[in-house]
Amino acid sequence: MRKNVEKKYSVKTTPKATLRKWYELMTLGRLLDERAPNYLKQAIGWSYHAPYAGHDAIQLAIGQAFTNGEDHLFPYYRDMLTAISAGLTAEEIILNGISKATDIASGGRHMSNHFAKPAWNIHNVSSCTGNHTLHAVGVARAMKRYKHTGVAISSQGESSVSEGYVYEAINGASNEKLPVIFVFQDNGYGISVPKRDQTANERVADNFSGFANLRIIKCDGKDVFDSMSAMDEARRHAIEKMEPVIVHADCVRIGAHSNSDKHEWYRDENEIAEAKAQDPYPRFRKELLEAKVFIESELVIIEEEMKKVMLDAHMKAMKAPNPDPKSIYDFLFAPAYVSTKYPNGTHNDKSEPVKFIDSINATLKAEFRHNPNTFIWGQDMANKEKGGIFNVSKGMQQEFGIERVFNGPIAEDYILGTANGFSRFRKDIRVVVEGAEFADYFWPAMEQYIEMSHDYWRSNGAFTANVLIRLASGGYIGGGLYHSQNLEGSLASIPGVRIVCPSFADDAAGLIRTAMRSQGPTVLLEPKTLYNSKQAMTPVPEDFEVPFGKARTRREGSDLTVITYGNTTHMCLEAAEKLATEGYDVEVIDLRSIIPLDEEAIITSVKKTSRCLVVHEDKVFGGFGGELVGIINDKAFEYLDAPVKRVGSPYLPVGFNRILERAILPDTQRIYEGMLSVLKY
C-alpha cells in the first residue's frame, strides 16, 4: 500500500510511557467492545452496538490527535475507541451503552454507541451516517473567522461518503480552505454492501483527488504507528496550511456490522478468518514484545488492571438512575427571548408605515449591530448591489463586511448544515440563513433541518443550533412549481423548531428580533407577495418584539372566528369587512406563530363566537389547518354551533399560468363564501 506520509512514530522511538498509555487504551477499548453485546443478552441495554475491532489503530490515533480545548470532534457510531482515546471514561462509555439518565451524551435519549462529551466539544452526532461532516465544516469556518488555532475532526465509514452532503462538505471545505480533517475508516463494507457497489475507485478518497486545496493522506488503519503519523501530519497540515485533509485509513471489520447483523450471510469463512488474522490489537501487542519494550508479564498486568477498570465502571453504571419518563418534554425548545416592553407583541406607534421588505432589512441590520457575533449566508446574499433573490439583505455586506455576510453555494444542505456547525463554536453566535432562494427549494436541506430539530432534545439540553432560517414562501406571484408552494404543513409535524409567519411589516420585524435573540432554531416564512404590498405596510417601532406563541386579533367580532396567517390574513380582513355590510361581525385571528401555537387565543375566541373558519393558503388536505380543527374539536366542541370548516388550496401543486394559479389559490371571494357558509349553518 502506497504511503504518502513519513512514519514519524515507531515502536523504537516512542517513549515507553506513551506506548503503555496506548496499550491501556486499546485493551480497555477491546474489553468494552467485547462486553457490550452481553448487556443486550442480559436485557440490560446496549441494543445497538457496532463493534470497532479491526479499526483499533486509526481510532486510537484520532483520539490522541484530538486536543481538548482546541479541537472539535465528531465521532460516528463505530468510534468507541476514538471516544476512549479522546478522553471518555469506561463508565461514560457504559452509561451511554445502557442508556442511563447520567449518560453525558444524551441522558438515554439517543441511540447507544453514539458517544459524546459536549463539555469537551466531542459532539453528539445523529444516526444519519456522514451528515456531521457538514457540522465539522461549519465549526472549521468559525475557527477560521475567529482566528482560533485548532481543527474539526469528522470520522466516518467509507460507505457513508456516498452521501451527497459529504461531497458538499468536502467541496465547501476545500473552496473555503478550512481546517477540518475528514477521516474515512475503510473496512470494505456498508453493513452488507461491499465497497465495489459504492464507488469505482479502490479507495473512496481518490474520488476527491481533483479537488483543489485538499490534502489526501492514506494510511494503514490497522497499524498504530502509521495511523499516528497520518493523524499527526493531518492536524499539522490543516492548522499550518489552513486546508482540509482527508485521512483514508484501510481497516478490517472483524465482526458483523452490529448486533442486529449476521455477517455470515454475506461473508464466507475464509474472508472472516482473514479479517481476524489482521486484528490490530494482537498485532500491536506482538510489536511491543518483539521490540522488547515490554515483557509478557508487564502486559498481563496492564490487561488485569484494565479489567478492573472496566468492572468498576460496570458496577457504578449499573447503580446509575434510569431516565425519568416525566422528563420527555424537557429540552424540546431552547429558551426563547422574553420581551418585557412588548409582552403581547402589540404597539401604538403612529410613525410612517414601512414596507414588509424594508422592515425585514432594517431589523436584520439592527440585530447585526446589536450582536457582533451574528452572521448571514445563503444563495445570492451578497454580490455588489444584490442582496438575496428579492434583495431583502440589500446593503448588509457593504455595512458588515464579507466576513459576516457572504454567499453560499447552490447547496441547501451545505447552507443549513454549516450553520448548525458554525453555531457550535460559541454560544453567543447567531446565524441567519436564507435557506433557499424560494421555500420550495428547501427540500434538499430537510435532512439537516431534521437534524437541527432534535439537536437540543437529543443532547439532553447540551447543544442547540442558534439559527434563523428565512424562507420566501407562498404564491400569488405567478411563480408556479418551485416558486409558489407552502411548507408549514410539513414542517410543523417535525418537533423542535419554532415556525413563524408574519402578515404585516411590524410583526415581521418583531418576530425576527425575538428569533435572533433566542436560543434554538426558528423558521421565518416570509410571504413574498407581501414584500412590497401596501396592505402589509405598518408603522414599525425600532425596538419592536413579538413573542413566540402570541396570536394577534386583527378584527374584533362576535359572530364568527376566523383563524389565519400569512397572505390570507389580508383576504380574511377584506371578506370580514364585506360581511360587515351585511350585518355580520367577524373576528379575525392572525396566528403569527405556528409553532408554538397560541391555543388560548383560539379557544377564547371560539368560545365567544361559537363558530369557526380556518383559512390558509396551503392545501386543505394535509395542511396545518387540520391541526387547528382538531384542537378546537378537542377543547371547544361543546361551544360550537356549527362544524369547523376550512378554506385553502385544493390538493394540487400551484400552476404557473396566472389563470391556473387563480384557480388553485384561495382568494377573498372564496374566503367570503366560506365565512358565509359557517355563519348560515
Image: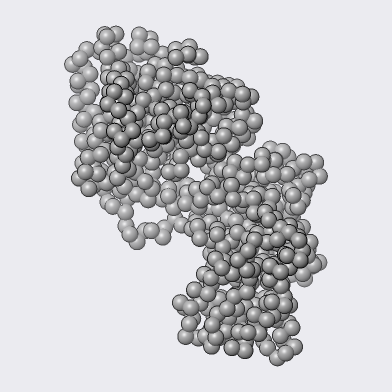
Tally the marks: 0
Relative placement, left or right, of 298 versus 138 is: left
Residue placed furthest toward the bottom: 583
> Of residues 463 and 356, which is closer to you in this image?
356
- Look at the image and tell me whether residue 495 can be seen: yes
**Residue 347, picture quadrant:** bottom right
Relative placement, left or right, of 70 versus 113 is: right
Tell me the residue at 20%/31% (across/down): 308
> Residue 420: x and y, percent?
55, 44
> Of residues 392 and 674, which is closer to you in this image?
674
> Of residues 1 and 309, which is closer to you in this image?
1
- Look at the image and tell me whether residue 333 can be seen: no
Q: Identify whether 370 is placed above or below 190.
A: below
> Residue 539: x and y, percent?
76, 67
Q: Identify whether 326 is placed above or below 78.
A: below
Q: Quadrant of the N terminus?
A: top left
Task: Tell me the colour scheme of the image.
Answer: one colour
Tell me the residue at 59%/88% (across/down): 681
Tell me the residue at 21%/27% (across/down): 305
> Residue 600: x and y, percent?
52, 75
Tell me the residue at 37%/21% (across/down): 222
Q: Identify whether 350 is placed above or below 134.
A: below
> Residue 360: x and y, percent?
72, 57
